[in-house]
Image: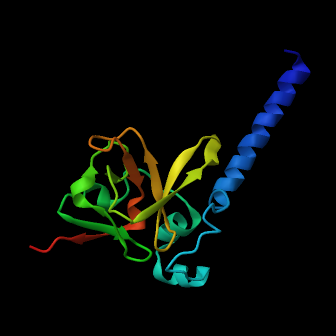
Amino acid sequence: MTRRDFLWSGAAGVALLAGTAAMLRMGGPPDARAAETFEVTKTEAEWRAILSDAAFNVLRKEGTEYPGTSPLLNEHRKGTFACAGCELPVYSSQTKFDSGTGWPSFWQEIPNAVGTTQDRSLGMTRTEVHCRRCGGHLGHVFDDGPPPTGLRHCINGVALTFKPATA
C-alpha cells in the first residue's frame, strides 16, 4: 500500500464515520414505515405533547435508550407491556426473560400487536419491531432467544408502559 492509498483509505473511513454520526444525530435512517398507514396518527407536536423526550426519540425517531437504564428491565410482576405511544398491549410478562443485554427482552409478542421492517442502518441488516397501531419504534428482534420461539425481542423500555395484572 502506498502512502497515497493509505491516506485515501483513512479519509474515506473518516467520511463514513462522519456520515454515520450525522445519521444517528438526526434520529436514524429515513423511516421505512413512511408508506404504511396506522390507526393512530398524530403530528410531531401532538406526539411531543404526550411523550417524554426519551420516549419521543425512541418511538418517533427510532432512537435507542442506554442499556440498563429502564425500570422495566427489572419488572417481574405479572401483567402486560403496552406501547407508550398508543397503549396497545404488545408483550405479556409471561414471555419476558433476562437476556443479559440491558434491555427488556421477550421471546414472543402478543398476536397482531407488532409489525416488522428491515433496518439496514449501522452497516448491518436487522429486523426492526414497531407497534402495529401507531407505528412507534419499539426495538429489534434477533434469532438468539430461548425456546419455544428462539427469538429475542430486544425492546426499549421507554417505548413501553407496564400494567400489572389484577388478581
**Could you say where residue 14 lies in the image, as x and y percent from the top left?**
76, 38
Relative to 76, is 97 above or below? above
Q: Nearer the viewer, residue 94 or 53?
A: 94
Looking at the image, residue 57 sits to the left or right of residue 85; the answer is right
Residue at the limit of the structure toward the front, as seen here: 112
Q: How many marks?
A: 0
**Could you say where residue 73 lies in the image, as x and y percent from the top left?**
30, 55
Q: How is the image coloured?
A: rainbow
Q: Nearer the viewer, residue 100 or 120?
A: 120
Residue at the limit of the structure toward the left, as seen here: 167
State the image quarter where residue 150 is shown.
top left
Q: Nearer the viewer, residue 57 or 136?
A: 136
Q: Quick one: quadrant of the C terminus?
A: bottom left
Residue at the limit of the structure toward the right, as seen here: 4
Q: Is residue 144 visible?
A: yes
**Could you say where residue 147 lies in the image, as x and y percent from the top left?**
27, 41
Q: Nearer the viewer, residue 124 or 157?
A: 124
Q: Quick one: quadrant of the N terminus?
A: top right
Q: Residue at x 50, y 80 (%)?
A: 40
**Could you say where residue 165 lies in the image, as x and y percent from the top left?**
17, 70
Q: Residue at x 43, y 63 (%)?
A: 114
Relative to 59, is 143 above or below? above
Relative to 83, is 68 above or below? above
Q: Is residue 65 visible?
A: no
State the image quarter where residue 155 is shown.
bottom left
Q: Residue at x 87, y 22 (%)?
A: 5
Looking at the image, residue 43 sits to the left or right of residue 142; the answer is right
